[in-house]
Image (cartoon, rainbow, N blue to C red):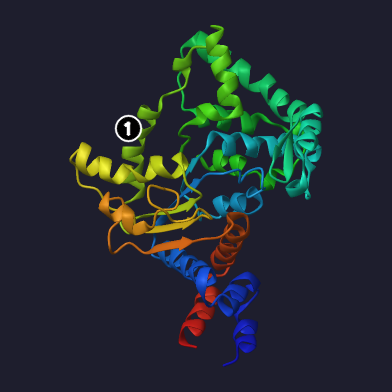
Amino acid sequence: MGFKSMIEPAGQLPILGFLLRNYKNFNARVTRDATLAYWRHLEAGGRMFWAVAGAMSSAQLGISLAPAIRAGLIHGLSVTGANLEESLFRLVAHDHYLDFPDYRYFSKADDARILSQQMRRVTDTSIPEDEAFRAVEKILVPMWLEASQTGQRRFWHEYFYQLIQAVGPELQSGPPEECWLLAAAQARLPMVVPGYEDSTFGNIFASHTKTGECHASIVKSGIEAMAWFYDEYRRMSQDPGLGFFQIGGGIAGDFPICVVPSIKYDLQQPVNPWAYFCQISDSTTSYGSYSGATPNEKITWDKLTPETPMFVIESDATIVAPLILNALLECKSNPEAANAMIATFLRS
């Protein structure tokens, strides 16, 4: 059977069909295989946990990530403080962003001019200070002040869950359906935000604790987050298990993946291993580089096992992640057609 005749009776699955037809070797093959293994894991009743580093929210990953959360393709998140807040910024200030497609040719003077415009460049786009930072500050700081007065303590993301759902249409500049933080808040998705202190609002919060206006204790610590995550992991990893899908490296990935050996060795309790692992990263594999380490190295730390399906896609996540997510969304919307297409592909 030719591929054209294979697609037509299967329904409208153009991204999945494109991936199966064209992604044959090298990073393309890994992208295809990681997508199919992800789908098989979900089909078996498994869950998937995402770790998102970098500046993916500024790169508008929410266009794909938000519908994936709503469709039940993602069951928990570990994100940097920057990704958390930048999803909110895209919602409230989207129309005020400026893009710089020629950023590679900028001089220091060019970037100084961007600073004078009160814009903060993130590769080829920029975050507007007044419409993003200052607009959100007016809502978030009173929440901190109230918590300081009442003694209420929450995790960092819980403040943002409350805030994002309080942003009405009159304050929205970007499409709410493309805001992954809003989708996560509405789904009450389990989340950890390790090392949020280096984010814009982490810095702003620190300044308010320095002046004595807010108490640092109103935000639960990273140690409390790990202790909380022990129980969440055990809940989510019940058979057939919880997979780990990682974009980039650093603390967003380091923090949650450690939960398995910590439960096993530090709590000395039984725990199911991660059931799937995929990392999209353009970091070069090298000695001493966690971001660029191969999954095999994680076996020695008992974070993964030799039986864990493992995939490393050495590419740009802004290209690869939307492709994977949209192929999975097609599978979710029409599983019978997707499985028929995949089965035909595997026989060919």
- Residue bearing the label numbered 1: 227
**Crowd tier of the residue under label 1, counting other residues whose Cα lies within 10 Å: few below 14, some 14–19, many 20 or above:** some
Q: Image quadrant of residue 172?
A: top right
Q: Position of residue 169 (x, y in %)?
A: 75, 35
Q: Is residue 287 above or below residue 134?
A: below
Of 297 and 274, the residue lying toward us: 297
Q: Residue furthest top?
A: 212
Q: Residue at x 77, y 40 (%)?
A: 107
Image position of 172 (left or right of 137): right
Is residue 158 visible in the rendered image? The answer is: no
Dot 1 falls on a residue whose secondary structure is: helix
Q: Image quadrant of residue 111?
A: top right
Of 262 and 149, the residue lying toward us: 262
Q: Residue furthest bottom?
A: 1
Of 291 and 195, the residue lying toward us: 291
Q: Residue at x 58, y 39 (%)?
A: 83
Image position of 219 (left or right of 260): right
Q: Is residue 269 above or below residue 139?
A: below
Q: In the picture, which quadrant includes the N terminus?
A: bottom right
Image position of 102 (left or right of 225): right
Q: Residue at x 62, y 15 (%)?
A: 142
Q: Is residue 261 above or below residue 297?
A: above
Q: Residue at x 54, y 70 (%)?
A: 28
Marks counted in the figure total 1
Is residue 59 visible in the rendered image? The answer is: yes
Which amino acid type corresponds to the residue marked 1 in the rendered image?
Ala
Q: Position of residue 239 (x, y in %)?
A: 30, 57
Q: Is residue 253 above or below residue 34?
A: above
Q: Position of residue 348 (x, y in %)?
A: 50, 88
Q: Image quadrant of residue 9?
A: bottom right
Q: Position of residue 11 (x, y in %)?
A: 63, 77
